[in-house]
Image: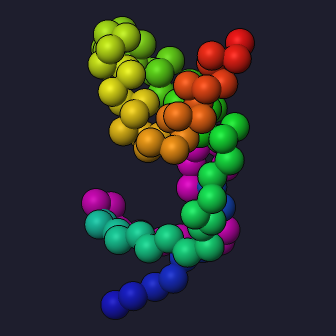
Amino acid sequence: MGQTIKFVYENGVCRPLEPVTLIEGARLEVELHGLSDAVSAEEYERTLKDLQDAVAEEFTDSEWAEVEKDILGPERLAARLGDREKV
């Protein structure tokens, strides 16, 4: 049986917009709608910084560079590296 539950995403947590009754241990499948494919450069940078802060002790600088490359993709990485060279 399906049910649609609307959530708002705030401070890293999905909060239901109305009361939800679920059985303990229930497994849910989430389908996201209303997302924009365009993410601002500032949002990418903020997310990368948060991630880097969270795993700072886990990666070497070269390992982190690989993570950045995978997350950003070639176009955003080139733009980001270009910005670093201007500084």
Q: Position of residue 61 (x, y in %)?
A: 37, 11
Nearer-the-camera pick, 8 or 75? 75
Nearer-the-camera pick, 29 or 60? 60
Residue 36 visible here: yes
Residue 16 visible here: no
Is 31 drawn above or below residue 4 in the view shown? Answer: above
* Magenta span: 10-25
Is 65 left, or right, of 35 in this rendering?
left
- The residue depicted at 66 percent of the width and 25 percent of the height is 83
Q: Position of residue 32 (x, y in %)?
A: 50, 71
Where's the C terminus, which quadrant? Answer: top right
- Count of all numbered marks drawn on residues in the image: 0
Q: Position of residue 54 (x, y in %)?
A: 45, 21
- The residue depicted at 32 percent of the width and 10 percent of the height is 60
Q: Position of residue 25 (x, y in %)?
A: 28, 60
- The residue depicted at 46 percent of the width and 85 percent of the height is 3
Q: Quadrant of residue 63?
A: top left
Is 17 drawn above or below residue 38 in the view shown? Answer: below
